[in-house]
Image (cartoon, rainbow, N blue to C red):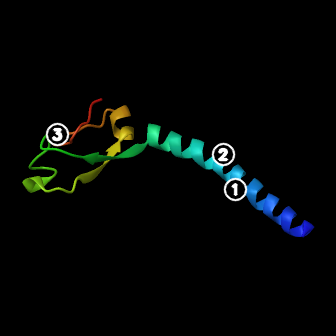
């Protein structure tokens, strides 16, 4: 029984180590490189959400190209 408790503690310790590494890496990635956003409503029709269907489109917002001023004609830009 003592070995089972030691084994359980080791798994919990490994989980928290991985958690405390994965969360900052994920937050940094979503803040600096790219993030996923849903497009809802008629503001982007007919490019996105054609036909006014109920399902919303999902887009990847590329933060990297905006920081490098690599915006070209025809690109969709999201401002907050």
Give coordinates of residue 37: x percent, y percent. Answer: 32, 46
Q: Is residue 40 left or right of residue 45?
A: right
The residue carrying mark 3 is: 73
User: For the point 77% across and 54% down, which residue is it?
Assistant: 13
How far apart marks 1 and 2 lie (CA) works out to 9 Å
The residue carrying mark 1 is: 15
Name, please, the residue furthest toward the top. 80
Q: Nearer the viewer, residue 65 or 76?
A: 76
Q: Secondary structure at mark 1?
A: helix
User: For the point 52% across and 41% down, which residue is it?
Assistant: 27
The residue carrying mark 2 is: 20
User: For the point 64% across and 50% down, which residue is it?
Assistant: 19
Query: Mark 1–mark 3 contact, CB under 8 Å?
Result: no
Query: Mark 1–mark 2 contact, CB under 8 Å?
Result: no
Q: Quadrant of the N terminus?
A: bottom right
Give coordinates of residue 2: x percent, y percent. Answer: 92, 66
Front disc: 3 or 2:
2
Q: Quadrant of the C terminus?
A: top left
């Amino acid at each position: 029984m003592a070995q089972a408790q030691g084994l359980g503690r080791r798994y919990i310790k490994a989980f928290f180590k991985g958690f405390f590494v994965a969360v900052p890496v994920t937050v940094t990635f979503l803040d600096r490189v790219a993030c996923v956003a849903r497009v809802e409503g008629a503001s982007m029709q007919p490019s996105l959400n054609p036909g006014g269907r109920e399902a919303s489109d999902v887009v990847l917002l590329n933060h990297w190209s905006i920081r490098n001023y690599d915006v070209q004609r025809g690109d969709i830009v999201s401002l907050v």
